[in-house]
């Protein structure tokens, strides 16, 4: 069951479904899971939202939190203003939750080792947190599901392998099984009637060690289960009898990025990649969909629609990955593994339209597919999910989707785990704000990310550069702002002596007035990246290099050039943070006279940080003013300083570099950007880095998504109106 997929034949991008033409999902709220920790307790400990479900009335979300060993609840009676619903403490690690009525079934892992797996299915009353029932599972549970008619609850008992043994390859007993537990008329478990379905001896890969990963129950009560590591799928009835089983198969991918080298290039081929599915969702009584995440040797980076007899009716190939790349969410640091890594999945029928929600764990995106024709899914939208979407629940009765994001980066100063809430309504999608759709070579998309500096061009055109995350592919992108979303209409790869330039950290761009560009590179001397200004031709060739003066290099630090602008023959470079010789809370503004080739310096007085640091991220000359972006390095609820400031152009009177008495610029605040950064109802991004001002004073602002590395991948590009 191997198929070859050509890039030119699988680019199925988005606008085609009825959903996209009439209505769209937009995010209306984000709930950080730490808010469920009671006040007075330590709210800085790691939390997570992983598998999520909802009560029948859709008013309460219930999620598993493995680090805290709890079940968390979120009151969404007002979905745009979610409130903490409390925690239920457990006696082990929750692996999944399934809600029935006012109760929740929780798979709990209590294993002492990989060779002695154990666990149970606990049943709790949501209102009181009281334990209503408990069934031993004879092993370590993974996913759970309740039959649509409430007749039984099913658990994939995985008994996962020890990945430190044998390079993590399968074939480590005890093998897993599927537990099916009947429910009485009150929805209580009849543990003594539990069926432990034997699924050994079915898969071609390690048949003695099945590792059931994900279960779902069809409207007809049939159970489908993925055996991810075994690359196999099994269909059972409620009695645990095998109705069908088959290999998940493999695909050959042409036009895929497999190298983690600081560039996005969809030029490689992967032969016979096992799908190794994770999540599975029935879409009717005859068809289900699998998310081809991969595990050890597989992961075809998309999804597959099967009939329950094993017939493939649709293979997405690279279309999902390509769509994710076009909106700047391609995780280049995962190219050598599984790309955008589809993992979680949800299905629901909204206003008569069957919709599949496909979660990209590494791209932090949710694909919204119209499944009216299972053989021809239509991608209607891509939603910004937050970091590491693990689970989702559709609430069609209220037009809602909730996505649980497991990553909590508190220990690294990053954002916390969030549950994102989306609502279906009239109007266009608010996201993405920037796409490269329509700019392809041979069907392959143009990937992009890490927007650092911007500059306004003619009409409604702006240009931006990417930073050192793509150090092996420094580029200038041309953007048409007249379209919605804004579209990248051209890309110029920077070259040096005719060969692709490398080891550049582009943080600023400006025009020279003659069709060329000046770009500022922030040095990382330990990585061989120099502090410099480069003069770039329209074809991308470096025509001239202007290195920083020795007096500056002698006191330089890593956080250097973060923007460049031009007034006449003077180039101005904003330095992000203090160098060794700068007073506290003062940063350098460097000038370079193109006529005299002399360097000058000013000091910019920035705000004093309450936590972390504050620095400059952009500089733009416009009219009688010079504008700056000043920001802290804080994110979400900790963000305090994200603003545009300005000083009079007449105050820009530098002295020679090395002077003892450096004039100090005293900026005035122009705009607090924090409300703007909340416009898509997500958390506040830390890196607001781009500012472009057009001749009429219209200003555009952008954020840097860090190449989707420990980042949600979201790039915001928006206008704040006329600064003048």
Image (tube, rainbow, N blue to C red):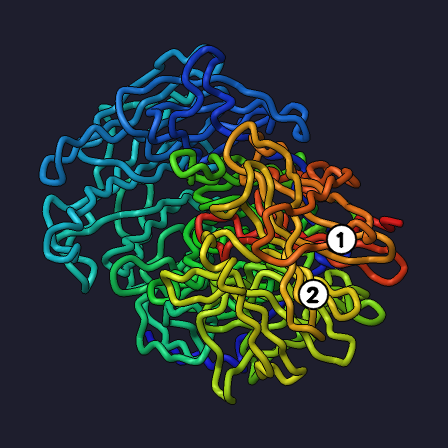
Is 703 placed above or below 102 here?
below
Classify 10 Å Cα crowding around label 2: few (below 14), some (14-19), many (20 and above): some
Measuring from the top left, give residue 264's x and y in whole percent: 47, 71
Specify the quadrant of the image occupied by residue 272.
bottom left
Classify 10 Å Cα crowding around label 1: few (below 14), some (14-19), many (20 and above): some
Is 502 placed above or below 694 here?
below
Numbered badge on residue 571 = 2
Measuring from the top left, give residue 348's x and y in whole percent: 57, 45
Which sits in the foreground, 45 or 175?
45
Residue under the point 32% across and 78% down: 271
Considering only order in the chain, which callout, 2 or 1, is on the residue closer to the N terminus?
2
Residue under the point 51% across and 83% down: 496
**Quadrant assignment for the N terminus:** bottom left
Which sits in the foreground, 599 or 292?
599
- In space, the residues marked 1 and 2 are separated at their CA atoms by 11 Å
Measuring from the top left, give residue 500's x and y in whole percent: 48, 82
Residue under the point 17% across and 50% down: 163
On the question of residue 294 being in view, the answer is yes
Secondary structure under tag 1 reads: loop
């Amino acid at each position: 069951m191997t198929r070859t997929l050509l890039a030119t034949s699988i680019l199925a991008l988005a606008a085609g479904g009825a959903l996209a033409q009439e209505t769209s999902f937009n995010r209306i709220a984000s709930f950080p899971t730490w808010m469920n920790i009671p006040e007075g307790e330590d709210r800085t400990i790691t939390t997570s939202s992983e598998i999520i479900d909802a009560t029948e009335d859709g008013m309460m979300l219930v999620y598993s939190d493995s680090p805290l060993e709890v079940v968390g609840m979120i009151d969404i009676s007002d979905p745009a203003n979610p409130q903490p619903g409390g925690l239920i403490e457990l006696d082990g690690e929750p692996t999944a939750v399934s809600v029935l009525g006012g109760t929740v079934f929780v798979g709990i892992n209590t294993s002492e080792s990989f060779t002695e797996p154990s666990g149970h299915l606990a049943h709790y009353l949501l209102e009181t947190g009281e334990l209503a029932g408990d069934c031993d599972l004879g092993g370590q549970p993974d996913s759970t599901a309740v039959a649509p008619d409430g007749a039984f609850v099913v658990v994939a008992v995985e008994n996962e392998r020890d990945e430190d043994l044998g390079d993590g390859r399968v074939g480590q007993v005890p093998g897993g099984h599927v537990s099916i537990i009947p429910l009485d008329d009150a929805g209580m478990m009849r543990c003594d009637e539990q069926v432990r379905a034997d699924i050994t001896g079915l898969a071609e890969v390690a048949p003695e060690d099945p590792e059931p990963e994900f279960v779902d129950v069809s409207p007809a009560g049939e159970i489908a289960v993925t055996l991810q590591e075994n690359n196999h799928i099994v269909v059972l009835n409620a009695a645990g009898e095998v109705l069908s089983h088959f290999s998940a198969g493999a695909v050959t991918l042409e036009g895929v990025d497999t190298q983690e080298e600081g560039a996005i290039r969809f030029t490689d081929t992967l032969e016979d990649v096992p799908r190794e599915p994770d999540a599975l969702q029935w879409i009717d009584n005859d068809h289900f969909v699998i998310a081809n995440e991969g595990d050890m040797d597989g992961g075809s980076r998309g999804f597959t629609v099967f009939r329950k007899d094993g017939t493939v009716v649709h293979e997405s190939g690279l279309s999902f990955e390509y769509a994710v790349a076009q909106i700047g969410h391609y995780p280049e640091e995962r190219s050598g593994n599984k790309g955008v890594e589809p993992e979680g999945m949800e299905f629901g029928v909204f206003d008569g339209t069957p919709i599949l929600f496909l979660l990209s764990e590494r791209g932090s995106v949710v694909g919204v597919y119209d499944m009216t024709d299972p053989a021809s899914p239509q991608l209607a939208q891509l939603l910004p999910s937050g970091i590491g979407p693990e689970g989702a629940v559709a609430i069609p009765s209220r037009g809602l989707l909730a996505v649980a994001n497991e990553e909590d980066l508190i220990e690294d100063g990053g954002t916390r785990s969030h549950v994102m809430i989306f609502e279906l309504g009239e109007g266009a999608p608010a996201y993405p704000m920037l796409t490269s759709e329509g700019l392809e070579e041979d069907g392959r998309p143009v990937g992009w990310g890490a927007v650092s500096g911007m500059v306004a061009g003619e009409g409604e055109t702006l240009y931006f550069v990417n930073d050192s995350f793509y150090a092996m592919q420094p580029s200038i992108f041309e953007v048409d702002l007249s379209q919605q979303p804004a579209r990248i209409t051209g890309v110029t790869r920077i070259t040096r002596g005719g060969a692709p330039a490398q080891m550049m950290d582009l943080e600023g761009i400006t025009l020279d007035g003659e069709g060329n560009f000046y770009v500022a590179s922030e040095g990382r001397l330990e990585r061989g990246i120099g502090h410099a200004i480069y003069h770039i031709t329209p074809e991308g060739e470096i025509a001239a290099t202007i290195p920083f003066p020795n007096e500056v290099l002698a006191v330089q630090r890593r956080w250097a050039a973060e923007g460049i602008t031009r007034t006449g023959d003077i180039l101005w470079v904003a330095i992000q943070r203090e160098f060794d010789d700068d007073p506290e809370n003062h940063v350098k503004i460097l000038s370079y006279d193109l006529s005299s080739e002399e360097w000058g310096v000013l000091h910019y007085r920035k705000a004093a940080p309450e936590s972390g640091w504050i620095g400059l991220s952009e500089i733009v000359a416009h009219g009688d003013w010079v504008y700056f972006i000043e920001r802290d390095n804080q994110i979400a609820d900790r963000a305090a300083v994200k603003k545009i400031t300005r000083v009079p152009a007449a105050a820009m009177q530098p002295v020679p570099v090395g002077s003892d008495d450096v004039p100090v610029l005293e900026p005035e605040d122009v705009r607090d950007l924090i409300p703007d950064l909340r416009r898509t109802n997500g958390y506040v991004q830390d890196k607001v880095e781009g500012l472009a001002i057009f001749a009429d004073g219209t200003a555009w602002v952008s954020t840097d998504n860090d190449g989707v590395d420990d980042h949600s991948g979201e790039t915001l590009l928006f206008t704040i109106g006329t600064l003048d």
